[in-house]
Image (tube, coloured by chain):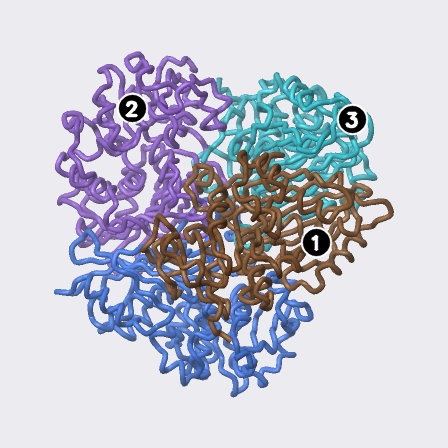
Chain colours: A cyan, B brown, C purple, D blue
Amino acid sequence: MSDNSIRIGILGASGYTGAETIRLLADHPMAQIAWLTADRNAGKPISALFPHLAHLPLPHLSTYDEADTAGVDSIFCCLPHGLTQETVAGLPEGPKIIDLSADFRMRDPAAYERIYGKPHIAQALQQEAVYGLSEQYRDAIASARLVANPGCYTTTSELPLVPLLKERLISTSNIIIDAKSGVSGAGRSAKEGSLHTEVSEGLHAYGVATHRHAPEIDQCLSDFAADPVTVSFTPHLVPMNRGILATIYVSLEHDVTVDDLQSTLERAYADCPFVDVLPMRSLPATRHVRGSNRCLISVHPDRVEGRAILLSVTDNLVKAASGQAIQNMNIMLGLDETMGLRQVPVFP
Amino acid sequence: MSDNSIRIGILGASGYTGAETIRLLADHPMAQIAWLTADRNAGKPISALFPHLAHLPLPHLSTYDEADTAGVDSIFCCLPHGLTQETVAGLPEGPKIIDLSADFRMRDPAAYERIYGKPHIAQALQQEAVYGLSEQYRDAIASARLVANPGCYTTTSELPLVPLLKERLISTSNIIIDAKSGVSGAGRSAKEGSLHTEVSEGLHAYGVATHRHAPEIDQCLSDFAADPVTVSFTPHLVPMNRGILATIYVSLEHDVTVDDLQSTLERAYADCPFVDVLPMRSLPATRHVRGSNRCLISVHPDRVEGRAILLSVTDNLVKAASGQAIQNMNIMLGLDETMGLRQVPVFP
Amino acid sequence: MSDNSIRIGILGASGYTGAETIRLLADHPMAQIAWLTADRNAGKPISALFPHLAHLPLPHLSTYDEADTAGVDSIFCCLPHGLTQETVAGLPEGPKIIDLSADFRMRDPAAYERIYGKPHIAQALQQEAVYGLSEQYRDAIASARLVANPGCYTTTSELPLVPLLKERLISTSNIIIDAKSGVSGAGRSAKEGSLHTEVSEGLHAYGVATHRHAPEIDQCLSDFAADPVTVSFTPHLVPMNRGILATIYVSLEHDVTVDDLQSTLERAYADCPFVDVLPMRSLPATRHVRGSNRCLISVHPDRVEGRAILLSVTDNLVKAASGQAIQNMNIMLGLDETMGLRQVPVFP
Amino acid sequence: MSDNSIRIGILGASGYTGAETIRLLADHPMAQIAWLTADRNAGKPISALFPHLAHLPLPHLSTYDEADTAGVDSIFCCLPHGLTQETVAGLPEGPKIIDLSADFRMRDPAAYERIYGKPHIAQALQQEAVYGLSEQYRDAIASARLVANPGCYTTTSELPLVPLLKERLISTSNIIIDAKSGVSGAGRSAKEGSLHTEVSEGLHAYGVATHRHAPEIDQCLSDFAADPVTVSFTPHLVPMNRGILATIYVSLEHDVTVDDLQSTLERAYADCPFVDVLPMRSLPATRHVRGSNRCLISVHPDRVEGRAILLSVTDNLVKAASGQAIQNMNIMLGLDETMGLRQVPVFP
């Protein structure tokens, strides 16, 4: 089964999503990593950056220029925002590209410029890119050359909401997403705000009403809703490394019950191996998905009439980043969607 | 100034709120602890339970029966819910009583029974008890014999909301409180769900729409609002020991702006030494109040028109428990409200 | 390859080592779990105790009496100390048994009684049991019916020391093991000392000079040393869930250099897929092995002449518990030693 | 009592030791902070860097040039290593100076150069500086103008060892210090190795046999021992913010018993308000001293004949940094040693 017939390149292997993509691909029976780029660390083994990967048979890190970009079947782009557009624009035609940055997620050039403060420099590709929320855009992903892998908060928030908006079960005008993330979402760059001393034994909100994932969520939800959606969205930094929990407050449409939400979600994800709709009133925890490509969702009646609460958890580095990226690659290459993604959550 | 003229007894000194009350009282220039009860540990020094208090000059733990309840000026009751009613009912007339349990918070016997599953056994006292949210019930507290110290989630949620409801600035029908707490709120009893392995490196919601603090919040807010209030309330368990953050989503009444919220809150707490209304869009963190009796509040405009987001943080063991209890004692005894409560937050 | 031809039973599936054994076996291409016992939780699905395992195709929990102990190829015994002796004594002849408790680790009945305070009740089996430090007792394990899986501190301490004692490179009389463990080593039982509040943001030693793993280490090291060994051993509880680090201080024998230690260890583990001897002066971290069956070892010259420092890290639930147990099963059944144990460490 | 008659300046208020000095001085009845320097943040309020100090009445941050260095009674120097020498050399004659950096700890210019890789540029001051281990150099501190405040590992290690070496109870040739520290010891600078993701849920040793605190410990111990001392010293980074635990392995001199160690330590610290020698076999935890100026010490017999184990804990930012600095200021100014340092440990 392990025929190594799919050659893979990773751009930007020195960050956490790069490392996590490598970790997961080590379990992929058909994948062979052909090259790993990390310009500032070119020439070093991956173990110089990530000792936990030392025992894997991997090529040394190389520069982008050294990478045989045409000689691979698939490229994972784990570069920082902004830098990515130009790089992707320069890639050859053949390989399937999964971009884990935010650069190709917004479809509208004006929206991109408003959010990121400068014009997009690869607008044709921006139009071409398919949004990679695997379970909801599967057909488009299957025929895409370039997939824009969704953000971590966005994946976790969109999965429970899309089916409910599709079926017109909840109001589009009163969706409140209170999201909580572990620290790895901030990446490996050395910032005061990510220090252990500044994060552990405490909690705070940030980017209140201004976070860049909010318009991304709006765009995705609006794809499926009757009307354009604008969500309230507040991210929080939790003293843990991995995991995202979205607590979502919704208003039910007339005559809709929480049982309708439950059954609709169960139906929507019945055939999706990575999304589990738990029995009503369940309490999913991020630790139940740690290290795995799973998303757990539950529905709760609110104590306020006509409202409901949705809970959704993922591992922000797996289902909400590198795992979904590999899932998308599998879809793009016509493979079994779960290939390489059967890791059991690590608890405790 | 250290005249030790106020004699104090603590019922239930073996839990975290008992220990925290002792820690804070060690800084109180007029307080002298006369007795500490802990029935199962009677006869032991406090250091047998809490080595961090070993160096303080404290009486040994005693049984309730041994405690000279009539010979003190003030009694802090740190006993578990349920047990407290009977104990408080048996206390003599003289001392001021501050009850840190939930037993006397709900004023309505029917509501109490509905929430706690059995009738209240000291209903006269239940009516007499004053709700101890210091800044909002100060006058009533000043003349009370029995104060029901508010819960931790409730203190943190009520402080930002009361002034806005008083002034009719926000809708009573769409208040959503997404609250996050450290683990010490669950007390020191050995429960699987409070183990380090079950709490650290993860996050989950619990008591969704069913937590007992929700009706307590309703009762307090309704005291000040135009109409009865029913809040949406979701608590979460965060892998930290101390701290509560409430993220509160509110709808503005017609013609009200977020600036109105800001100025109203600033005015409301201008003379309150422990409540700081931060500049608009500030990001208070629980670590900024750790170990102190402070509450930090900030106002944020939401990205959805007509809505705003309030952030409020406390140390759940101090302002939201033992610190507020001492603040209430100071008010009841006519002392400076800040006496013994000037601890600077401990960070990092 | 996934032929499910090896039928497996797990006794005591409600604890962390039980759950971890299940997690790892899910990756084993030949293993099929036939039954899982948990007497107090019989009848429930494993997800009732461990939601992170919910998606695996597993039998419901059963009582011991319901388990078809004769119908399996291998039994993992994850029961508490003391209880295990009687249970193992009652097992049928056929299946290979790997006991993860301490009950069969000490070979000498008198030593067992001294340490555990009561006589061993299955002394014949105690003699028969083979100590399961895979890399050092591989031949005996291969032909054993009953393997006593080593303790977590012991595995981590013995792997670096055994080759050095075998080759007479270090003194037997001055071995100091300062060991640090995560909290999962204390199991899932609800104990005050394992609460998040009592563990996080702090550190302490425990069982100083009295821990039960010390005589186990003595016994193993003495198997390979010129003289009986008595180690100094101090365990510490670190606020993390997984991982053990042993910092070991040794005195070099006459004319021995740290380079000799390095080369001896490299040679000893050259063919061992799970033990990596890092370049001299490396700094292994427990996070580099988290979730994996790996042990990392490094050698450091001390600043004191004639002394050296060894560092050794494992995941206490994998290489130092369930992983090594599966490794031993593989050896006992003549399978590839790494089968089911290729999990890449999860970092961060 | 709060007469504010002691004017204080703090050089380098933007780091953790600066902030901690401010926190503690807020409780000092005679201290008034006259200025705080932080060159890159001059003009800002301290709350811009440390929101937890926002409510204190403090001057804004200034540049060094703006600080009235001659107009204060005492100066705390919280600048980085290296930079400090020149700054201290430029200070006027009057004020008492407590330097929290490592610059004046080593007395021997050659040793300094060997350790820090460049010559000391203020060697006269280096000779003049008194080592500030308060309990052991109290008389010299009382008459000093410049005190070199000890390092965090060193304070914690030296306090239990000095009395035993003074009394010739332990061998000078076999002292092994295995020390574990929280992350705040690494300061607030943004380094990859101090990120939450790189520290939490894991453990590692660093600076094995090469850490700069080892020669500092040697120097101090040699001051009191019969012979020059060279210790084995291994620091470890523990996923917590505050706290140091030193586990120290010693060999008893002929005819010495662990009871001798115990009684000698008890006698040595009988009159020291901040050092508690616990009953033999006690298990001090860093959480028992968190936020306080306390050091807890215990003695354990080893299981190896003729050896003993010492445990010592401090809060690395208080007794092992800012607290001891204030204690030294009190001694230098002839005040009660405990003034401003009566904070009760914060637990949990």
> Residues at marks 3 and 2, common chain?
no
Residue B236 placement: quadrant: top right
> Residues at marks 3 and 1, common chain?
no
Query: Do the residues bearing badges 1 and 2 touch, measured as CB atoms within 8 Å?
Result: no
Q: Which residue is drawn at 52% across and 39% down?
A: B202
What percent of the width, then of the height, locates residue A220?
74, 30
Q: Distance between the residues labelled 3 and 1?
A: 33 Å
Which chain hosts label 2? C
Task: Indicate which label's residue lies in the foreground, 3 or 1.
Answer: 1
Label drawn at residue C179: none
At label 2, counting other C-alpha atoms closer than 10 Å, the crowd grade (few under 14, some 14-19, many 20 or more) is many
Q: Which of D313 and A116 is in front in this view?
A: D313
What percent of the width, then of the height, locates residue D208?
37, 56
Q: Which amino acid does label 2 sit on?
A: Ile
- The residue that mark 1 highlights is B298
Q: Which amino acid does label 1 sit on?
A: Ser
Q: Nearer the viewer, residue B255 or C21?
A: B255
Task: Indicate which label's residue lies in the foreground, 1 or 2.
Answer: 1
What percent of the width, then of the height, locates residue C218?
20, 43
What percent of the width, then of the height, locates residue B288?
59, 57
Quadrant where the image shows the C terminus of chain A: top left
Q: Distance between the residues labelled 1 and 2?
A: 62 Å
At label 3, counting other C-alpha atoms closer than 10 Å, the crowd grade (few under 14, some 14-19, many 20 or more) is many
Which residue extends farthest bottom? D93
Residue D115 placement: quadrant: bottom left
- The residue that mark 2 highlights is C331
Q: Is residue D107 above or below residue A220?
A: below
Q: What element carries label 1?
A: strand
**Residue D78 visible:** no
Q: Which amino acid does label 3 sit on?
A: Ala
Q: What element carries label 2?
A: helix
Label drawn at residue A225: 3
